[in-house]
Image (cartoon, rainbow, N blue to C red):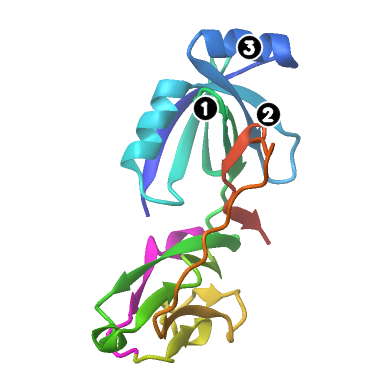
Amino acid sequence: MEVMELRAEARTGSGKGPARRLRSQGKIPAVFYGGGADSVPISVSSADLRKLLKSAEENVFVKLVIDDAGKKAEKLSLIKELQIDPATRKLFHADFCEVSMDHKMTFDVSLHFTGTPVGTQDGGEMLHLKRDVRVSCLPGLLPQFIEVDVTGLKIGDSLKVADLKVAEGVALVDGEDTAIVTVMAPRVAEAVEPEAGEEGTKEPEVLKQKVREE
């Protein structure tokens, strides 16, 4: 279980004005959600958060050190949601949720595919249908990833969620019949042209929303 520290400050202002001032100071507005308690508005250093995200594995546990007028509190958390500005690609907002080590939570865990399907040697094409799956477990049992060996797949074969192997105490939430990877005969992909006049969204882009309480 990887835990990384991130310093934060309690904030009182709300709205676009205070948020804009924070960003001009190299910080971003954020919110910490505690177990059953009111949410706590905080701010964190944009540079520190980027450094943490760059060096950490997925679903990294964050020890928030929150400074509230000189009083410091440490909270174990996970990043619930992260947003970026679609125009500047700068961090825009972050949500952290408190983690209780004796309370099960639902996480999205990446799939790491290993091997080369035998079907590709016969001209087949491997198609990834899912890149992650949802699991339920105590935080201390959360795997960094789930390994999937695709070596034995022939043309027409597929692997499903039921074929995944996870450690004791980790339960797969996705349906057992959900396919995650298949090997199919070669096909010609059709290019899809974007509709004329279609514009990108101007709303903040959600980068991460992968943890849920049960």
Please report the residue visible at 36 percent of the width from the left and 49 percent of the height from the top: 57
Could you say where residue 31 lies in the image, as x and y percent from the top left? 64, 31
Could you say where residue 98 lies in the image, as x and y percent from the top left? 59, 44
Q: Amino acid at mark 1?
A: Leu
Residue picked out by circle 2: 40
Tell me: 137 left or right of 147. right
Query: What range is drawn magenta here?
Result: 139-153
Q: Is residue 12 depicted above or below 127 in this figure?
A: above
Tell me if I can see residue 13 in this picture.
Answer: no
Q: Amino acid at mark 3?
A: Arg
Query: Which of labels 2 and 1 is toward the front?
Result: 1
Among the two numbered marks 2 and 1 on one chain, the one whose residue lies closer to the N terminus: 2
Name the quarter where the N terminus is drawn. bottom left
The answer to which of 4 and 17 lies nearer the viewer is 17
Please report the residue visible at 53 percent of the width from the left and 8 percent of the height from the top: 24
Q: Amino acid at mark 2?
A: Val
Q: Residues within 10 Å of mark 3 (few under 14, many from 20)?
A: some
Helix, strand or loop status at disc 1: strand
Q: Residues within 10 Å of mark 2 (few under 14, many from 20)?
A: some
Residue picked out by circle 3: 20
Q: Quadrant of residue 174?
A: bottom right
Please report the residue visible at 40 percent of the width from the left and 25 percent of the height from the top: 48
Name the quarter where the C terminus is drawn. bottom right
Residue picked out by circle 1: 91
